[in-house]
Amino acid sequence: MNRTRLVGGLVALALAAALGACSTRGGMDGGAAGRAGAGAGYGDAAGGRHGARAAGYGQDAAGAAPRPSQTVILFGYDSDDVLPQYQPVVAAHADYLASHPGESAVLEGHADERGSPEYNVALGERRARSVLKSLRLQGAGDEQLRLLSYGEEKPAVAGHDESAWQQNRRVEIVYTGP
Amino acid sequence: MIRFPSIPPWLPGLLALLAVTARAELTVDITQGVEGALPIAIVPFGQTEPAGDNLAQIIAADLESSGRFTPMPAAQLPERPVPPGAVNFPLWQSAGQEHIVVGRVTPGSAGAPFEAEYVLYDAIRGSQLLAERVAFKAADARRAAHRIADRIYQQLTGERGVFATRITYVTASGSGKSRTYRLYVADADGQDAREVISSPEPLMSPAWSPDGKRIAYVSFEEHAAAVFVQDLATGGRRKVSATPGINGAPAWSPDGAMLALTLSKDGNPDIYTLDLVSGALRRLTQDDAIETEPGFAPDGRSLVVTSDRGGKPQLYRLPVGGGEPQRLTFDGDYNARGQFSPDGRSLILVHGDGGAFRIARLDLGTRELIPLTKGRLDASPSFAPNGRVVLYTRKESGSDQLATVTIDGRRHRALPAKAGDVRGAAWSP
């Protein structure tokens, strides 16, 4: 278990390093995704977390990572790739889940309204699964996570244009508590 | 990694302009629909009761929506005979009418207080083609008119009329915590909508049983997807599928014994059949791609499904008994939600083309793909049981969201729907 966590921590570290390289690329899928990723300031949290890990694999509850405040991850059109600006967000959730084995979360997948509603349910699930794989890889436990795709049925933003659509292509990480 | 270019500032304006242009073209289409349709005159019925629309008006609107008839505008009728009064046939011949319907509503019996009596004449020969009486209650006046329209349609085209059938659809209204989803059943012309069920969580994908008595649908009421089958007469319902992950896209087998479903319990969305009596599940696809939106062929031996095994969503024919899926669509990079026509010779589907999603028909003989609508966000196409008209949903701001189009793409009709975002439309058997 500790070994898995250590590997997870190293992956997170590598991702955090990759973030620095990615941050200049930007411009993916309009501006909103970039803004949302940059606004949360996970750089500091990541630093603190790795410190805690090095000291004792996050076993100390007081030193464990806090529950991340950013819970929405946006996606490109017809894509389930976790964009570089969201990888630190996913890493922070993975770390929180890994350090709080009693916590659990539902990964709610969503799609924009274009195309066929049932295909969009499948697309939403594929996005949620993509986040799930990434969380697992970074130390979150199988039993802590559940997938739920709503497709286009629960838009975050009403409207029939790209500015609404890019907010609606998302995965929401909803904690269901210990 | 796929990269997406940022949106240029002029694009939203261009899209808005395109949307306006598309709407203008739609209006032109409605006028073109008149061509090739049979002229018919529906004379206002002698009717003081029940209050509400004259039956003739409902019958005329029904016949017009089929694309097969052009009812004479009421203002141009050369005379307004009411049975048992005589009809002046030469007058109608010189007005260019080949068929005339006259009728009246008289008191009926205690059980059905009204009786509609109508006659369909061949105006050229001066002969009666139909002379019938339909008993009804005041609340069923529209339904009586639809039944008369069905009889006239069948008499003159030799095909089944679908005006007395029904439709189902889902609305979503409100936002955030006050968002409500409602499933309705309405008459085929959108009137008399009745709520079947409502929920604070999404309702999706209603599908009629072949006997028209039950509806299968997806509900998220337990914060997970589940498929229910609900009896329309009693309101009683049964949860038939609630596996981990997706439980979606229910489709009835032609004999009503099975549902085809999309389940993701084994890792990703695949097609299964569920025996409604034994509960036995059978998996029909297994690969890493999305498979969803099954629809049975009329013979029950194959399904049309949406699959992105080739990278983009396309339609495939899948043998129910097992075997390799055969790809059916090749035009464009988005073809989804296929449904077989009642004769099995064509499919209706959602076709993505240059960012717009439209309803199209695929002729399975010629492989020709024929776009029928010009919207931007059209979805959920469903054949009328005679295969002549298609019900679908639209999402343009400010436009009616429920509509029909004839399979030649010529006659468009907006249907009234309950308030909210309309989704998941399906036409009854």
Image (cartoon, coloured by chain):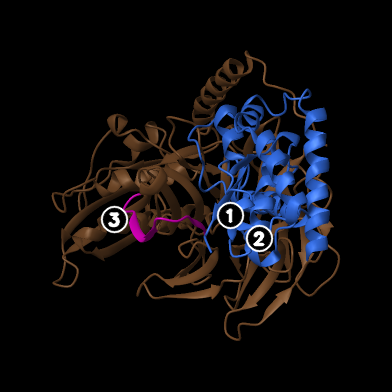
Chain colours: A blue, B brown
Identity of the residue drawn at 63% across and 14% down: B9
Q: Position of residue B384 (x, y in %)?
A: 53, 55
Identified by mark 3, the residue type is Tyr
Does B408 sit left or right of B136 as displayed? Answer: right
Q: Position of residue A12 (x, y in %)?
A: 78, 46
Foreground mark, 3 or 2, reads 2
- Identify the secondary structure beneath mark 2: loop
Which mark sits nearer the N-terminus, 3 or 2? 3
Q: Nearer the viewer, residue B350 or A177?
A: A177
- Asked if the residue under mark 3 is in contact with the one under mark 1, i.e. CB atoms within 8 Å, the reply is no
| Residue linked to disc 3 | B118
Identity of the residue drawn at 79% across and 63% down: A2
Identified by mark 1, the residue type is Gly
| Residue linked to disc 2 | B343
Give the CA distance from mark 3 to mark 2.
Answer: 32 Å
Identified by mark 2, the residue type is Asp
Q: Quadrant of the N terminus of chain B?
A: top right
Q: Is residue B252 visible?
A: yes
Does B345 sit left or right of B374 as displayed? Answer: right
Specify the quadrant of the image occupied by residue B332: top right
Q: Nearer the viewer, residue A19 or B74?
A: A19
Identity of the residue drawn at 25% across and 43% down: B44
- Asked if the residue under mark 2 is in contact with the one under mark 1, i.e. CB atoms within 8 Å, the reply is yes
Region in magenta: B191-205
Determine the main secondary structure of the stretch shown in magenta.
Answer: strand
Are the residues under badges 3 and 2 in a single subunit?
yes
Most extreme residue toward the front is: A55
Q: Is residue B125 visible?
A: no
